[in-house]
Amino acid sequence: MVHPAGEREIPRVVDILADSFFSDPTWSWAFPDPQLRRAQLTRWWDLYLRGARMHEDTVWLSENSESASVWFPPGASEFTPEQEALIEPLFIELVGAKQAERIMALMSGFEEMRPKSEPHYYLSLLGTHADHRGRGIGFSLLADNLGWVDSMNMPAYLEASNPANVALYQRYGFERVGECTIPDGPTLITMWRSAAK
């Protein structure tokens, strides 16, 4: 059964996300060296999930821990101020100051695009480990999560970091509402799903 990840399951979530975003256009741009990328993504998602764990029912796993999703409730911050202070130094450590500056611009782009006028659930991450891809497990997790969001009569928002996934999200009721291209970097597609009627 789909369930919120417990503390002991967080390393598995980090592993799923590091694996599933390895070839993602946005995150492979952020961490361009494929020899280092998995370790870099592992460090980044570990920090990111520390922020996500501040909120209840934020990190989700499929029944057999093949897929993971990260949802933030309306108005929730992704990091404490103390965690936020660690982000840029971590990127500098992982990729150097110049690339870290570019990644920080990407992070600002995420923040600027997120709708401010209407409370919503924010699907930050959805990924499936390579060993289990192509069987619909990730989108089954998404469907269950959306049922949960619908039970609260709330809309949902996401940024598609891989344009190839836009059509898949549209099947689950998301509509494309905008995009942002980072200079010399990826294009992020913003998508909105209205509250269930």
Image: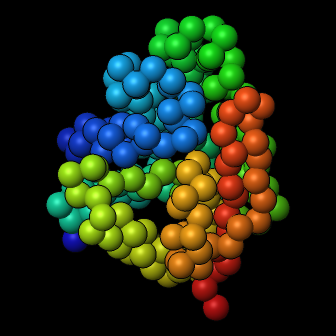
Q: Quadrant of residue 96?
A: top right
Residue at x 68% of width, y 73% of height: 175
Residue 22 x, y percent position in the rendering: 40, 37
Residue 160 image position (x, y, % from top left): 59, 55
Instruction: Identify whether 33 is placed above or below 134.
Output: above
Relative to 78, residue 83 above or below: above
Quarter-of-image position of residue 97: top right
Residue 141 percent coordinates (x, y)? 36, 68
Q: Choose between 83 and 94: the one closer to the eye.
A: 94
Residue situated furthest left in the rendering: 64
Q: Is residue 164 visible?
A: yes
Where, by quadrant of the figure, is residue 77 drawn? top right
Asked whether residue 7 appears in the rendered view, the answer is no
Residue visible at 38% across and 19% down in the picture: 36
Q: Residue furthest bottom?
A: 197
Placement of the N terminus among the 4 image quadrants: bottom left
- The answer to whether residue 138 is above or below residue 24 is below
